[in-house]
Image (cartoon, rainbow, N blue to C red):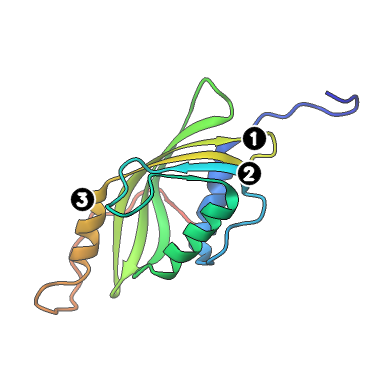
């Protein structure tokens, strides 16, 4: 390490917090300097026709831009966020519920991610595990079959994070 420079600890929780802000900003573009150029994004349980692995910032940016443009809902917040630090200080496991609004109703689904960052806290690896049945149920429940617009009861929110 060059003299005069001090080592710093990587902070995957800080990178996750920046990612949360990106999601709630509803921009089609990625947050500058949040991802490394060689980022690898994996989602082993994605739906049919969706990639399970994306390599490189350009490919990921293209995927995100197209995906965000086609979303039928708007993300509104996060709840039940739990960050679990690992033996590797650059890696954390994060559990959360992502809230979204569709047709005037707020729905949520659970997620789990394993996020690894580099020395600049840029995401170098993101492995996302989605509860696909919960996502499908949330989307289906937002549009009642009888066309009613009355909201369906949902469980009380806890530990909500908003930037």
22 lies left or right of 102 = right
Question: Neighbour class for label 2 at 10 Å: few (<14), some, many (≥20)?
Answer: some
Q: Is residue 121 visible?
A: yes
**3D distance between C-alphas at marks 2 and 1:** 8 Å
Q: Position of residue 83 (x, y in %)?
A: 46, 36
Task: For the residues labelled 2 and 1, say whether their Cβ atoms are less than 8 Å apart.
Answer: yes
Taking depth in this image into account, of 88 and 126 the one nearest to the observer is: 126
In this view, which residue lies farthest toward the left?
146
Using the rendered view, name the quadrant where residue 9 is placed. Answer: top right
| Earlier-in-chain disc, 2 versus 1 | 2
For disc 3, the neighbor class at 10 Å (few under 14, some 14 to 19, many from 20) is few
- Using the image as rendered, state which of residue 148 and residue 127 is in the foreground: 127
Q: Which residue does the numbered mark 3 point to in the structure image?
A: 133
The picture places residue 41, in percent across and down from the top left corner, at 48, 43
Label 1: which residue?
A: 118
Q: Does 7 appear above or below 62?
A: above
Residue 14, horizontal then vertical, whole percent = 59, 42
Left or right for 101, reference 163? left
- Dividing the image into 4 quarters, which one contains the N terminus? top right
- Report if the CB atoms under discs 2 and 3 are less than 8 Å apart: no
**Residue in the foreground of this view, choosing between 1 and 157:** 1
Give the residue at mark 2: 36
């Amino acid at each position: 390490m060059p003299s005069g420079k001090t080592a710093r600890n990587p902070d995957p929780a800080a990178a996750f917090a920046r990612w949360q802000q990106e999601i709630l900003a509803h921009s089609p573009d990625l947050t500058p300097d949040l991802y490394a150029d060689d980022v690898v994004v994996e989602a082993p349980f994605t739906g049919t026709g969706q990639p399970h692995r994306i390599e490189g910032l350009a490919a990921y940016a293209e995927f995100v831009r197209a995906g965000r443009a086609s979303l039928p809902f708007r993300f509104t917040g996060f709840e039940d966020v739990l960050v679990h630090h690992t033996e590797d200080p650059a890696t954390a496991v994060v559990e959360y519920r992502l809230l979204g609004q569709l047709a005037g109703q707020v729905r949520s689904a659970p997620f789990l991610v394993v996020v690894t960052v580099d020395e600049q806290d840029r995401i170098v690896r993101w492995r996302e595990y989605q509860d696909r049945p919960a996502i499908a149920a949330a989307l289906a429940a937002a549009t009642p079959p009888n066309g009613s617009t009355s909201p369906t009861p949902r469980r009380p929110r806890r530990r909500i994070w908003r930037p």
